[in-house]
Image (cartoon, rainbow, N blue to C red):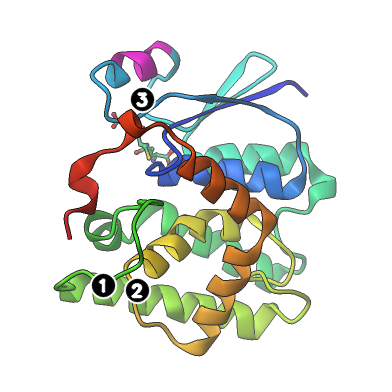
Amino acid sequence: MSLTLVIGTKTYSSWSMRPWFALVEAGIPFEEVLIPLYQSSTPQDIRKVSPTGKVPLLKDNGILHWESLSILEHIAEQNPGAKLWPDGPAARAHARSAATEMHGGFIELRKHLPMNFRRIPRPRPTMPDAVKADVARIVQLWGEAREGFGASGPWLYGRFSIADAMYAPVVHRLHAYAVPVPPVAQAYMSAVMASATWKRWEKEAAAEPQNYIHPAYDAD
Ligand SMILES: N[C@@H](CCC(=O)N[C@@H](CS)C(=O)NCC(=O)O)C(=O)O
């Protein structure tokens, strides 16, 4: 398998982080191509390779995959040994539903708490009720996963799965905006942030050049 993953700036690109996280965590080799976001050339640079004008994109032996969850499904299908979905019908149903709920939802959280790996963790001055509702639903889902299916390890369903990749940027958001969460969610977040994969993304984001940085991102 010859894989190329096209991603955006690691500091900001939450959708890029998802398939990257799964590939690295599963030890699947790939070539990374990074297109910096928020540059004057960004829209045309992404359009050259992407039918949607968005990243991430995966090229597998010349075949293009777009949309983060579709990319993750392809990675899981091509790498059955990596076991990127949990075992058992109930855990799989929960994990697939939770991953899809993330892909299509939590709009308010995404809008008000954008991913920014350079942010020094601190709360926003105000937190809209709609964001609080998204957070409440997320911690409910994480609690169900951890308490119902997570006994074998620190990830949502014990072993690492695509659901963890889908929620990795949410872990960052809740941490970076110092959002209070229950102990089960906090323990899960600490485990994700302690992983070598997380630390690698964090280190590579911190090493991005200054001209990748969008000043408006850290306004409050
Ligand atoms: N639904 C898409 C969302 C992709 C997306 O919004 N990507 C952002 C970066 S995180 C992007 O490409 N932005 C570039 C732009 O809008 O110019 C997915 O799941 O991959």
Label 3 residue SS? loop
Magenta-drawn segment: 44-48
Name the quadrant of the C terminus: bottom left
> What x and y, as percent, mark residue 146?
62, 80
Tags 2 and 3 touching, CB below 8 Å: no
Disc 1 target residue: 123
Label 3 environment density (alpha carbons within 10 Å; few <14, some 14–19, many ≥20) = few
> What x and y, as percent, mark residue 72?
60, 43
CB of mark 3 near ligand 1 (< 8 Å): yes
**Residue at 37% over, 53% down:** 104
Q: Is residue 124 within the magenta segment?
A: no
* Mark before the other along the chain sequence, 2 or 1: 1
Label 2 environment density (alpha carbons within 10 Å; few <14, some 14–19, many ≥20) = some
Q: Which is more foreground, mark 2 or mark 3?
A: 2
Residue 55's place in the image compared with 193, above or below, is above
Q: What's the magenta bit mostly, secondary-structure-wise?
A: helix
Label 1 environment density (alpha carbons within 10 Å; few <14, some 14–19, many ≥20) = some
Q: Quadrant of ligand 1?
A: top left
Disc 3 target residue: 52
For this orientation, the residue located farthest to the right is: 81
Residue 178: mark in rendering: 2
Instruction: Choose between 171 and 82: the one closer to the eye.
Output: 171
Residue 124's place in the image compared with 217, above or below, is below
Q: Amino acid at mark 3?
A: Thr
